[in-house]
Amino acid sequence: MFKYEVVKVCKQSGARIGKLTTPHGVVETPVFMPVGTNATVKSLTPKVLEEIGSSIILSNTYHLYLRPGHEIVAKAGGLHKFMHWDKPILTDSGGFQVFSLSDMRKINDERVTFKSHLDGSSHVFTPEKAVDIQQALGSDIMMAFDQCTGAGTSKSEARRALERTMNWLDRCYKHKTREDQLLFPIVQGNMYKDLRRESLERILPYAECGFSIGGLSVGEPKPIMYEMLDELKPLYPQNMPRYLMGVGSPDCLVEGIMRGIDMFDCVLPTRMARNGAVFTRLGNLTIKNAKFKEDFSPIDSECDCYCCRNFSKAYIRHLLNAGEILGGELLSIHNLRFLIKLMEDIKQAIWNDNFGDFYRDFTEKYNWNIKSK
């Protein structure tokens, strides 16, 4: 049911285009996956997601376990039917969410005990339970349960987490029963190159058609993340996609693809949108700023999204300052379409064997901290 085929490698840069076949369709990589934490990408309907070019979305095991409960999703016929999305879905295992609850959880080799961020109730996750929940959800791709560690973790703690992650991966692999779901193992190792190399080598026997790189973009400077990816790149197998978890700023996507990454996800584009900020090819803008009060131009004259084709910065600023839901919705459409269009442009550059030129031009112009054009 699952197959990954590399269809083009850029002669100039080595970046690649691939096709991942799943039970709910083919995903062309490199790809950015919008995040639908609670079985919805915030404020956007599945129809809108299709219109902006989404081919796969991500949903969250931890959150759906807490509400409405994976049993209810299973009774509805699985996540695809529950949320009316007939394209591929990837679910994370809940490992990162448990990691983020650092003051509300306890970890040992057997399980994680944690308190719900919703009501403080106590819960237990094991690798087997993470698999059971994801099998009930019925996603196309499920993540192995892992232990993520943050920037600044000692090497001994990173080693302990790596060993625990390997033990949990083996338990996930043995417990999984559904053949129509693909299990992605996860590379850990914190910011230690030797641990990263070891982790990749050890997870590959469990990787049937893809794997993930976790524990990056967790507080470390971006150059450190790129160093870790540079270290791993020569060791990647060619016949499966590589998924960098939780990364979604435009500069990181371009840098990641240059370093052999095929799949990305992040809540950043919709979170920024709800706070009035947007992506452009030069950097991000804060549309709430007073300087846009009488700016009747689109956010990006080169963008083909519904927002940029129809509305001005002044109007969107008005919506945001008036507390109108439409403001965040329009900016979410723009930010997600911006990233998906960026993927399309990158693929075209790879087909043309000039992604190296694209990379240099983009990185010279892009400034994450830009406040205005």
Image (cartoon, helix red, strand yellow):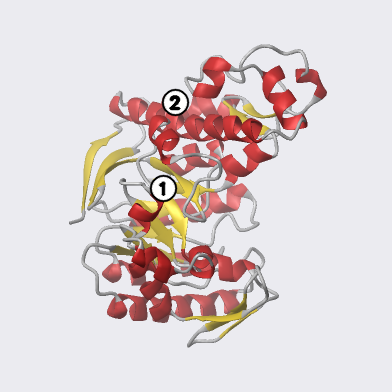
Q: Position of residue 102 (x, y in %)?
A: 66, 73
Looking at the image, can residue 261 be seen? Answer: no
Location of the C terminus by quadrant is: top right
Residue shown at 53% from the left, 62% from the top: 215
- Neighbour class for label 2 at 10 Å: few (<14), some, many (≥20)? some
Q: Position of residue 249 (x, y in %)?
A: 56, 40
Q: Residue 220 appears in which quarter of the rendering?
A: bottom right
Q: Residue 349, relative to residue 228: is it above or below? A: above
Q: Secondary structure at mark 2?
A: helix
Q: Position of residue 40 (x, y in %)?
A: 49, 49
> Would residue 337 appear left or right of 3 to someone viewing this image?
right
Q: Residue 59 appears in which quarter of the rendering?
A: bottom left
- Neighbour class for label 1 at 10 Å: few (<14), some, many (≥20)? many
The residue at which mark 1 appears reads as 57
CB-based contact (under 8 Å), mark 2 and mark 1: no
Q: Earlier in the sequence, mark 2 or mark 1?
A: 1
The three-letter amino acid code for the residue at tag 1 is Ile
Residue shown at 38% from the left, 80% from the top: 128
| Res 358 label | 2
